[in-house]
Amino acid sequence: MSGQRIRMSTLEDQNQFAEQLNQTFGQVSDLVFRSAGRSLVVYIAGIVDEKRIEREIILPLEANPDADGIPVKTPSVKTTDDYQETVQALLHGEAVIAIAGRGNVIMANVASAPHRDINRPETETVVQGPREGLVEHLETNIALLRRMLKSEKLRIRAWKIGSVVKTDVRMLYLDGVASDKLLTEISNRISAVQLDAVIESNSLAENIKDRPFSLFPTVQSTERSDVVTEALMKGRVAILVDNTPFALIFPFTFWNAFQAIEDYYINYSSATFLRAIRGLFIIFALLLPSLYVAITTYHIEMLPTDLLLSIAESRETSPFPAVVEALIMESIFEALREAIVRLPRILGQAVSVVGALVIGQSIVQAGIISIPMIIVVSVTGIASLMIPRYEMTFAIRIMRMILLILAGSLGLYGVALGLFFTQVYLTGINSVGTPYLTPISPIVVRGLKDFLLRAPIRRRNKIPQKGKSSP
Amino acid sequence: MRSLSLWQLYSLMLLFLLGTSVVFGIAVPAKQDAWITAAIGMVLGSGLLFMYSKLYETNANTSWNGLLILAFGRHIGAILGVLYVFLFMYSAARDLRDIGELTNTFLLQKTPIEVSMALFQLLVAYVCYAGIVRMGRLAEMNVLVMIFSFLLQIVLLIATGTIRLSLLAPVAADWKPIMTTVFPGSLTVPYGEAFAFAAFWASMMPPKEFRQAALLSGATAGLFFIVLDIISITALGPELFSRSLFPLMSTIHLVNIADFLQNIDPFIVTNYMIGVLFKVAIFTYAACAHISDLWKVNSQAAVIPVSVIVFVYAFYMADNLSSHLFTGFQWATWVIFIPFFVCLPLLVLLVIKLKSIRRKRREIG
């Protein structure tokens, strides 16, 4: 198919071309053929700006039917004699102009596909800071980033991925800031992707990230344009996929998951305080239920007598061992969480009522689950909502369940073993060449400035300027 | 070949040295002078580490197995190499038994010791399978946890108010127990045991930096032992200190902040697991490295069989905690640690030096 040449010397050729297009697209109703003077204009209605076609193509062609060269006023114009390229151009919202007597056809970019307006990002909210989220339209996203990053060093590499449905993929980076090794590695991985179609950025991410089957994310996906900008300035690489309002950012390390963009928008002491609180509660999110189960089951001597008595008293009526209680409550919490995400927004209230009243109150009154367990699960639930990166919440939530079972069977020993196993596992993960636990292991002193502490902005690492990067 | 950074090797060796010694206490028989013993042990132990690094320097690309063959020829060298496989496995098994007994005493009284040991050895096998680079990364992360935890323990003990410095008196009234405890006890465990690194040091870093890391970690570990000994003696008193099986655990048991924070020993035990993990892992890895040197197999292939042997060994090596400790302090020191981790390396060093001197003379003459 590809490489098929278009001849456009006579009027018959023009008709044949129209017929061929009609066959390729299967007589669809939105494929529009218009004649203007001696020319034939083809486009797909709906993804082009018809007013512009009228003004920039039809009118000049009718006014001056015998003009040579490029007889249209559209700024972005290309010519081709490759049939497949013509088809792709039509799909991307270009108008194809076939003039009898020419060897090729003209493609004028008048794309104007409907898309969503720029909105507030819904998944990563901040109190202070920019409020623009990425949208599904690739060009809009790139324009947004261009506006935020007014630097000639912003580079964009382009791919079309997909053997059946072609999707535009762009890789953005700052020249001289992102390391060449990283760029080559990611470029190679993207070029090697063999997919029929890319529906959403995740289908690309799964094909290019390290450890695609792992619980732990090795790529960050974000909806916020400022997060992308910040990442680019740190020498990371962003990948934008058409039709996806989420950018992929490489490399992604474990600790990145616990840093929120807002940390840079507020006073550094407050930001450090927030990071400390977040760190503490993320440890809770991972460990609180298992510690509670381990201590109340195996190491009760650790509890002060008064606390022990009150826990024992409230656990008196519960028929289950602590670990079963915890598993039941954790599962219910996870179910509620999933239900609220999937729910039509109007029904949200209903789930809250069922969750709070029916489960929270009745289960205690019925004496099935003890009150301390409800407290533990609630604190854990709140804590797991504090993790700034959504991908990481899955890792923490699933690890929590595993540790819970270990705690129920082996107490603190089991929890410690589980944590060690996880650590050894994490030391083996890389994200495009960066060890997953950087800057702690291997230790990178520069990286510690923005780790638990958020150093004052002027003390933060400068954007590396090593001049032109070597080829 | 360089696969670790200086900080990584330092962390690895520090955790190795702290290992089981913090659990059982250093130089306990010396009573109130145990800290002096620990200090002398630190100096002598650093000397021992220095000797190891000198040994490494003779042939910068050769680990212990290769050095044995260089010194004694192919046949005797290889036989000694095989012997070291078993020595390392035995040492790993001793430490595995230590953590088993510790878990049995403080964490899981009703769980059979073989279950806890099997799970621990599984973890060790995973660490060894991951290899030296990841072991280094693991160490540099955990050394921070370990140091933080020690500082916390010291603060908690001081806050509890159990520390009475007068219990240290009389200082050095009797030198005989001090010296008998230094040699051989405090010298061989843990400094002599650090000889396990010889089995694969050529895959870690060049001799000069190895020496730096070894001496620094030896000094840091010694400092920890001195401080922990002083804390334990002043909290427990010399008599109780010398009779306790786990002196530091008995000390931590005294922590009581506002009647709320008390009996924190299970937490502390899980913390000590870090050190023991690295100790068992290094010994197991040393055995695997020797096997892969001797039979030219991938060291990962040796991990599972070695781990099984270590576990079986640990399970059958003693009937109970007392006999296990007796064997460790009396028997293992004289039969294994002194001859094979101190004397033989010294001998090999001398032989190789002599050979090189003779070769030089021959070249000149």
Image (tube, coloured by chain):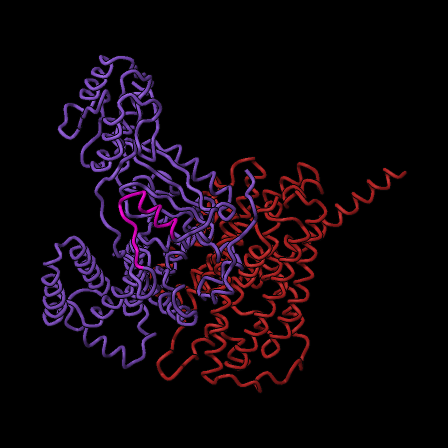
For the C terminus of chain A, which image quadrant? top right
- Can residue A331 be found in the magenta stretch? no
Residue A447 horizontal/vertical position (percent): 50, 58
State whether residue B110 is above or below residue B284: below
Residue A305 horizontal/vertical position (percent): 29, 80
Query: Front-most of A154 and A6?
Result: A6
- State left or right for residue B258 relative to residue A178: left
Q: Does the rendering let one see residue A421?
A: no
Residue at x 32%, y 16% (from the top left corner): A5
State whether residue A386 is above or below residue A433: below
- State left or right for residue B171 relative to residue A435: right
Residue at x 40%, y 56% (from the top left corner): A256
**Image label count:** 0
Residue A109 horizontal/vertical position (percent): 30, 34
Q: Which color was chain A given?
A: purple
Residue A175 horizontal/vertical position (percent): 49, 45
- State left or right for residue A385 relative to residue B149: left
Q: Quadrant of residue B337?
A: bottom right
* Chain for colour red: B
Q: Quadrant of residue A46?
A: top left
For the N terminus of chain A, which image quadrant? top left
- Can residue A132 be found in the magenta stretch? yes
Query: Which range is magenta?
Result: A131-147
Q: Residue furthest right?
A: B365
Query: Front-most of B352 and A54?
Result: A54
- State left or right for residue B64 relative to residue A194: right
Q: Does the rendering let one see residue B318?
A: yes
Query: Front-most of A390 and B342?
Result: A390
Residue at x 42%, y 41% (from the top left corner): A156
